[in-house]
Image: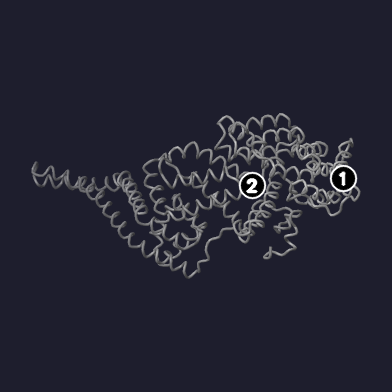
Amino acid sequence: MTERSIGEWTRLPHDPCGFFGLEADFDRRQLKRAYGKLIRQYKPDTHPAEFQQIRLAYEHLESRQRYGHREQMAALERSAWDAVVAQAHVEANRAGRPASSRMPQPAAASPSLSQRAIDDAEATFAELERKSTKSPQEFFVMAMLADVCDRQDRARFLKCLLAGMHDHPHDPGLCELLREYLRADVNSDQAPAVLVATAAAVRGDGFYELTEPLWERLLREKPFEHFRATLLKCEKRLRLVDERPRVVFYLRVLRALLWKADEKFLRHAFGVVERHGAGLDEQSDYEFEFALLVREYLSKDRPRIGGQVVRQRLDSMIRDYCTGDGPTTMTAVAAAQDEIARDSHGILDEFSLLAMEDDETYDDSRLLRICLMIADDLAAQTGAEYGTTSDASFQALASVTLNDMSESVVEVEARIGKMQRRILVPAFLGLVVVPPALLWGLAPLTVLLGISATWWTAAVLVYFLVLKPRYLDKVIERRLKRICLEGYESKWRPRLFRYLQSCGQPPQAALERLYETALHRGAADWMEVVLAYPGADAGLIIFGRAQLFIS
């Protein structure tokens, strides 16, 4: 840990807020940004130990923030454990149980109790067990000594810990020890029994926050029925004062539930959030919007994927993001983004605006929104940034792109002019010239000239006042849109893909630079036509955003 000063690293595990350089009233976006900056330096493949410490600190703060805790209480929580027996960690290591990575490390210990625990662990454990009332620190020591006294009974540690939680449900030290035990030491096979036992001891609002990682593991690794049956048993035992922790928990697991739960349970889970979710923070509202979008995507868009390779890849990415586990998930999502960023031809083929024009039921807006939300989260958690293209290079790319596109604009304009002539000229001749010509030879010339003059006057008025504005212009407008869309699809769109792939800038910034260049050259009119389409081009936006994650 040489790149970051020792003073800052020693803040862990006691002061994660200070380690990340956050104020006490930080929000989750600030936390993600701080986390992203650190893991750019300490990557999991090059600095695994440091990354693990950073990740644990991040998860701890993120969980506390979601559940409404504030770090103003951190100092009080730490000082409350100044009298914990430090030597309990020694005994825990002798028993083969690693001390919690976030366990409060006491600044001072009770000399008499710590010495007795070292001299005679079994006698100390028996003495504490006989006491009718015990302090949180005594329960802590009992739990740590449990394995030393009886290594055959692996559940003894949890029994002591839950007994302490029953008597002291809000004690910060016991809460952290239980949280870390459930996170690291309980597998998915043990999870149902452990969760039910925990619900019997921790019956208040803190249950969901303490057990959330274990619920996520159970949902991830076991059939959904295990999750539902266990949750039902646990919730029957709880006595909640505040519904917020329950809402926060359901909101957390909604993503994974969407891929595993049945419709009946999904209605129940969404109902819990909708009924009691008023007052949640902006980030929680954002996450609920994401869950709603994924729910619609699964019911309306996913069934239409078929054999489309890029869409299958995006679907797998969304599933991994919703159901995966922390850093492993982000690695998989980043790999998927990297593949998408390199497959311009696949996206051009599968995200056709002409196909959407022909089939009004086809709508990629949900998929686009989901992909952008995932990309935003991935960028925040990985610290990914666009390349540092110089302004001169950026401008040169925009100029070359504009030159290439201007040639195809001439072709499209020629098509438009030809289309207009094919509609307007025959209509004009058919209305103004043909009817008098049909009367030619049927009457004296003077009569025909009089009739023709009258007809021409009336026909011209009808053509310009009625036929052209009410019918012909509408036909031209429809054909014009189609020609421009075809021009965008076949000529301008592929060039925009290459431009975004080359410039290393966010899609919006790249398109704005292209328009500014066209404006400077006096070509803004036709560039406005070209840039009318990217806003609805899900493939282009997804592709451009994915350039951020090219490895």
Give the residue pinned by disc 2: 282
Residue 116's spot in the image, x, y percent?
89, 47
533 shown above or below 444: below
**Quadrant location of the N terminus?**
bottom right
Q: CA distance from mark 1 to mark 2?
A: 54 Å
Q: Which residue is nearer to you in this view: 114 or 391?
A: 114
Residue bearing mark 1: 120
The reply to whether dot 1 and dot 2 touch (C-beta < 8 Å) is: no
Which of the 4 quarters of the picture holds residue 322? Answer: top right
Q: Residue at x 44, y 42 (%)?
A: 363
Q: Characterize the local packing of mark 1: few (<14), some (14-19) or many (20 or more) Cα atoms within 10 angstroms.
A: few
Q: Say whether disc 1 or disc 2 marks the residue closer to the N-terminus.
A: 1
- Total marks shown come to 2
Q: Element type at marker 2?
A: helix
What amino acid is labelled 2 in the image?
Glu
Residue drawn at (48%, 51%), measured in percent from left and top?
A: 542
Whole-percent x, y for residue 550 in the image:
50, 58
Measured along the vertical axis of the image, is residue 114 above or below residue 515? above
What residue type is disc 1 on? Answer: Asp
Q: Nearer the viewer, residue 258 or 434?
A: 258
Left or right, 43 with reference to 406: right
Instruction: Give residue 184's position: percent from left, percent from top.
Output: 69, 45
Q: Nearer the viewer, residue 98 or 242?
A: 98
Please indicate whether residue 105 sits to the left or right of residue 334 in the image: right
Q: Nearer the viewer, mark 1 or mark 2?
A: 1
Q: How many other residues sit within 10 Å of disc 2, few (<14), some (14-19) or many (≥20)?
A: few
Q: Is residue 110 left or right of residue 379?
A: right
The foreground one among 18 and 218 is: 218
